[in-house]
Image (cartoon, rainbow, N blue to C red):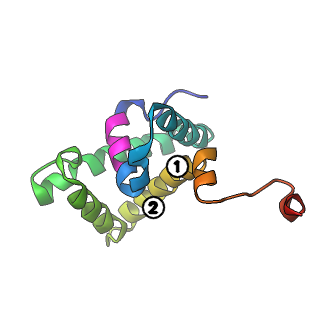
Amino acid sequence: MAAQVLAPVDPLFRALARTVVPEAERLDDQGWRDLIALVEDALADRPEGIRRQLLMLIRLLGVLPFFRYGRTFLGLDSGRRRRFLESIQESPLLLLRRGFWGFRTLVLLGYYGRPEAAAEIGYRADPRGWEARR
């Protein structure tokens, strides 16, 4: 794995991820390591500029709630966190909306890309396709 992109924003990334996928609240240390490794692997092939933009977006999502709630994202309760992210995903600012949807996609990849999550939801895809199910 390449350099850890998310390490500087780890607590904020985890709080945002828990809001995007509430089931992530149940993850143990290994589950978080697996989720983050999947996201880091997805980021490894991206240009450095994209990785910097992602970090900037995560930091921005951390401070933007201050202007609405008088607290940073980490200082919000779960309901306000959810409402804040819902407002971001519907933002009239296209760049912010696109950035959040990209972030959300990475979190979903990390959470549902783990074999344990696939088993939880009954996902049984196989590289052999439908032949594997016969």
Q: Is mark 2 on a helix, strand or loop?
A: helix
Decide if residue 117 is on the left or right side of residue 62: right
Sort mark 1 into few (<14), some (14-19) or many (20+) by Cα contacts within 10 Å: many
Q: Is mark 1 on a helix, strand or loop?
A: helix
Q: Which amino acid does label 2 sit on?
A: Trp
Q: Nearer the viewer, residue 82 or 23?
A: 23
Decide if residue 3 is on the left or right side of residue 53: right
Location of residue 120 by image quarter: bottom right
C-alpha distance separating marks 2 and 1: 15 Å
Location of residue 74 by image quarter: top left
Quarter containing the C terminus: bottom right
Q: What residue type is labelled 1?
A: Tyr
Residue lying at 33% horizontally and 68% vertically, measured from the top left: 93
Sort mark 2 into few (<14), some (14-19) or many (20+) by Cα contacts within 10 Å: some
Decide if residue 116 is on the left or right side of residue 32: right
Q: Where is residue 110 in the image (x, y as percent from the top left)?
A: 54, 47
Decide if residue 61 is on the left or right side of residue 24: left
Quarter containing the N terminus: top right
Q: What stretch is highlighted in magenta?
A: 10-16
Q: Position of residue 76 (x, y in %)?
A: 18, 51
Q: Where is residue 68 in the image (x, y as percent from the top left)?
A: 14, 60
The tag on residue 12 is none
Q: Where is residue 59 in the image (x, y as percent from the top left)?
A: 30, 43
Residue 114 visible, this angle: no
Q: Nearer the viewer, residue 119 or 107?
A: 119
* Prevailing secondary structure class for the magenta stretch in the rendered image: helix
Which residue carries the number 1 mark? 111
User: Considering only vertical position in the picture, is 47 above or below 90?
Assistant: above
Residue lying at 57% horizontally and 50% vertically, measured from the top left: 117
The tag on residue 101 is 2
Residue 10 visible, this angle: yes
